[in-house]
Image: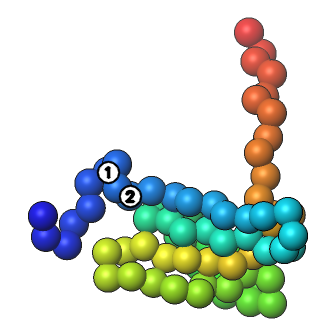
Amino acid sequence: MGNKLTLEEQETIILYDNKNKEAEVYTHHKTLIKKLDKLCTSHPEIFQLTAENDLGGKTYKLPKRYVKINAPRKSNT
């Protein structure tokens, strides 16, 4: 297959548990990588890049309080 991942293989995984206060984010999503890289630079005490692989994936560590799932916005129609 070579060193290229299919779109299905270019996943994002967010891991955290009920014991620890930190979450781990593993991603191949280019926009998310750019955002997390900027946060690592501007707030290194909060966001840390912990690993990179040769296929373009990166792993970050951050407080799990920054992992959010929001309700859908109300439609104006």
Residue wearing tag 2: 10
Camera sees residue 63: no
Question: Front-most of 16 and 61?
Answer: 16
Q: Is residue 76 above or below residue 56?
A: above
Residue 70 x, y percent position in the rendering: 79, 40
Q: Measuring 85% from the left and 63% from the top, which residue is drawn there?
A: 18
Residue 23: tell me if it is visible: yes
Q: Are marks 1 and 2 in contact (CB under 8 Å)?
A: yes
Q: Give percent across and percent down for residue 72.
A: 76, 29
Disc 1 marks which amino acid? Leu
In this view, which residue lies farthest toward the top?
Answer: 77
> What's the distance in space between the residues labelled 1 and 2, CA to CA?
5 Å
Position of the C terminus, as image quadrant, is top right
Residue type at mark 2: give it: Gln
Q: What SS does tag 2 mark?
A: loop
Query: Crowdedness of circle 2 by 10 Å Cα count: few (<14), some, many (20+)?
Result: some
Q: Write down the residue under mark 1.
A: 7
Q: Quadrant of residue 35?
A: bottom right
For residue 74, the mark is none
- Percent across and percent down for residue 29 are 46, 60
**In the picture, which quadrant includes the N terminus?**
bottom left
Quarter of the figure with residue 75: top right
In the displayed image of the protein, which residue is found farthest to the front?
19
Secondary structure under the numbered disc 1 in the rendered image: loop
19 to 12, vertically: above or below: below
Query: Crowding at label 1, few (<14), some or many (≥20) Cα neighbours within 10 Å?
Result: few
Q: In percent of the image, x 80 and y 83: which residue is there? A: 46
